[in-house]
Amino acid sequence: MERGKMAELESLETAAEHERILREIESTDTACIGPTLRSVYDGEEHGRFMEKLEARIRNHDREIEKMCNFHYQGFVDSITELLKVRGEAQKLKNQVTDTNRKLQNEGKELIIAMEELKQCRLQQRNISATVDKLTLCLPVLEMYSKLREQMKSKRHYPALKTLEHLEHTYLPQVSHYRFCKIMVDNIPKLREEIKEVSMSDLKDFLESIRKHSDKIGETAMKQAQQQRNLDNIVSQHPRISGGKKSKKELCASSDLEVKNTSPMSEQDSGILDVEDEDEDEEVPGAQDLVDFSPVYRCLHIYSVLGARETFENYYRKQRRKQARLVLQPPSNMHETLDGYRKYFNQIVGFFVVEDHILHTTQGLVNRAYIDELWEMALSKTIAALRTHSSYCSDPSLVLDLKNLIVLFADTLQGYGFPVNQLFDMLLEIQDQYSETLLKKWSGVFRNILDSDNYSPIPVTNEEVYKKIVGQFPFQDAELEKQSFPKKFPFSEFVPKVYNQIKEFIYACLKFSEDLHLSSTEVDDMIRKSTNLLLTRTLSNCLQNVIKRRNVGLTEDARHAAEEEIYTNLNQKIDQFLQLADYDWMAMEPGSRASDYLVDLIGFLRSTFAVFTHLPGKVAQTACMSACKHLSTSLMQMLLEAEVRQLTLGALQQFNLDVEECEQFARSGPVPGFQGDTLQLAFIDLRQLLDLFIQWDWSTYLADYGQPTCKYLRVNPTTALILLEKMRDTSRKNNVFAQFRKNERDKQKLIDTVAKQLRSLINSHHS
C-alpha cells in the first residue's frame, strides 16, 4: 500500500518536472536551450518526456490551425484590394517616368553649369590649400637656403643655430612632405659636416699658433721689458708719476682681447700680421697678434652638439704635444744668445695663449691643467738651461743669458706663473758665471805680472804721487814725509791688480741685479767670489811668479814677503784669540771645544789649503810658526796675571781646546812634516794639562830633571803659578773633594806640592 503511494508520488513529481522543462523550452532562446535538454537526458524518464513533448506539439498545431481558419477571409479581401491597386500604380509609374524624362531634358544645361561650378569650387579649394601649404613650406625652404649659404661662407656657428631652428621649429610643421623627410635625413650629415669643418679651422689655428709662438712671446717679453723700464724710471723720479697715466695703463692689459668684429674673423686661422715696431714706439700687446675666434666657434659648436668633452680632450691633448715640442731646445742653443731668446719666446708665447684661454672660456682649460703644464715646462726648461749654460765659457754671454732669464721669469710672473725655481737656478748659474770670471781674470793677472819689472814705482813730483795714490789707496806717513824723488814700496802690478779686483767686483754686481736678493745676500755672493779670486786665482798667479827663477826678485824681497806671511798669519790668530771668553770659575767643562777655537781651526785649515801651492819650505814654516804662536798664546792666556783663580772644570774645558789644536796638527794641514813634528808645538801645554788633570805630582817630582821624565817640558815655575791659582780657589769652595778625604788633607797636599816646587825652583837658580 505504501509502496503504491510512493510510486504515485514520484510520478507526480516527474510530471511536474517535465512540465517545467517544457515551459522553459517554450520561453527560452534557442541558443540557451542546451542546458535544459541536458537536464532531460540526465534523468531516467526521457521516454515519458518525449511522449509529453509530442503531445504538446500536437496541441500547438491544433491552435495554429484554428488561428489560420479564423483569419483566412481577411487575407482574401486584402489580396483583392491589392489587385485593384496594381492598375493604379502602373498608371502612376507611367506618369512619373514621363515627368522624369521631361525633367532630365530640362536639367541637362543646369547639370552642366553645376558641374562647371563644382570644378571651379574644387580648383579654388585646391589653390587655397596650396597657398596654405606653401606658406608653411616657404620658411622651411628659406631657412634651408640660409643654412646652405652660411655653410658656404664658413659661418659655422650661425649655421648650427639655423639648423637647430629648422629642426625643432619649422620642419615639424611640414614633416609629412617628402622633401622635408629628405631634409630631416640630411640633418645629421650637416651636423657632422659642421663639426668636421670647425675642427679643421681649429687645427689650422693650432698650427698657426705653434708657428707664431715665438712672435707672441717676443711681443709679451717686449711689453714686460717696457714695463720694467717704466718702473725703473718711476722709482728714480717718483714725482713725475703723479697725475699721468703709466705706460702700463696705456699698454694692453694682461687680459687678451678677441677680434670678433674683424671681417675676416670667420675665415682667418688665428694670427694677425703685425709690422715690426721701433724700440721707442708702443709695443702692441701679445693679444693684438692673436684672433681666438676659431677656438670659441669650435667650442660653441661642440657644446651645442653635446660633444664639449670630446673637444676639450682633443684641445688639451694637442696643446700638450705642442708644449713638448716647444720645450725641446735646439742642440746648438748655447752657441748664441738668439738661440736662448727664441727658446724663451716660444715658451712665453705658448703660456700667454693658454692663460688667455683660461680666462676667456669656461672650462676649456682649468687651473689644474695650466699648473700641470707649467710644472712640466719649468722642470724641462731648468734642465735645458743647466745643460746648455754649462757649455758657455764667455762671461758676457752668461751675463746676457742671466738678464734674458730674468726677463723671461718676470714676463711669466706677470701672468701669474710661479718662477721662484728660475731664480734659484740663476744662483747656480751665478757660480758658473763666477768661474768664467775667474778664468778671465786669471789671464788678466798673468798678463799684468808677466809685464811687470818688480821694481818700486819711482815718483818725481806731487802730481804723479797723487795719481798713483788715486789708483791704489796706499797710505804711509813716512813716505809722505819724504821729499821727491821717492819710491813706493811696490811695483806697478799692485795698483793694476787692485783696479782689476774692483772690475771683478763690478762684474759680479752686474749679475746680482734684478735677482730680488737682499743686500746681505748680495754681499755674501760678492764676498764669496772675491775670496776665490784672491785665494785661488791671484794666489796661483803669484805663486807661479814666485816659483819662476827668472823673476827679478831680490833675496831680501823674498825673505820680506815670507816674513810678511808669517806676521799676518799670527796677527789673524791673535784676532781670533781676542774672542776667547773662558769662565775660569766653571764647575764643569762643556761638551765640545770653544766656538772661537773651532772657528780659528777652520780658518787655519782653509788658509793652509791655499798654502799648499807655495814652496814647500814656506808653507811648512808658516804652519809651524802658526801652531807655535797659538800654543804660546794659549799658555800665556792660562798664566796671565788677570786670571787670579781657576777651577778644575775650567782647566778641563781648556784641555778640550788644546785637544782640538792637537787634532788639527795630526791632520797634516801642510804636507812634508815627519811623524808628530807639528804636534810637538803643543807639547808644553799637553804635559802641563796632563799633570794637573791627572794630579800626577808624585811622578813629576820624582822624575824631575831626568831625560826620560814624563813631564820634561813642564817648568816648575809655570806649575807653581798655576797651582797657586787653583789653591786660591780651593780655599773658597770644595772643588777638590775627589782628591782628599777632608779639607785639611787637601790644603796640606797643595801646600806640600807648592813647597817642593819652590825647592826645585831655588835649586835650579842656585
Image: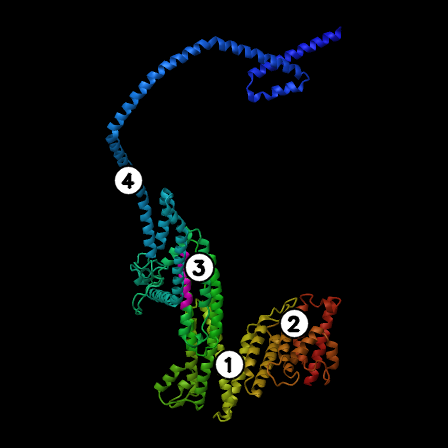
Of the numbered discs in the image, which one, if any, rests on residue 651?
2
**Element under disc 2:** helix
What's under tag 2, amino acid-wise?
Leu
Q: Mark 1 = which residue? A: 536
**Of label 2 and label 4, which has the lower sequence position?**
4
Of the numbered discs in the image, which one, if any, rests on residue 127?
4
**Element under disc 1:** helix
Up/down of 613 relative to 54, above or below:
below
Question: Residue 439 appears at what percent x and percent y?
Answer: 47, 81
Mark 2 against mark 1, which lies toward the viewer? 1
Number of other residues with Cα within 10 Å of mark 3, as a class: few under 14, some 14 to 19, many 20 or more: some
Q: Mark 3 = which residue? A: 315
| Magenta segment | 345-361
Cα separation, mark 3 vs mark 1, equals 56 Å
Q: Are marks 2 and 4 in contact (CB under 8 Å)?
A: no
Viewer-proximal residue among 686 and 281: 281
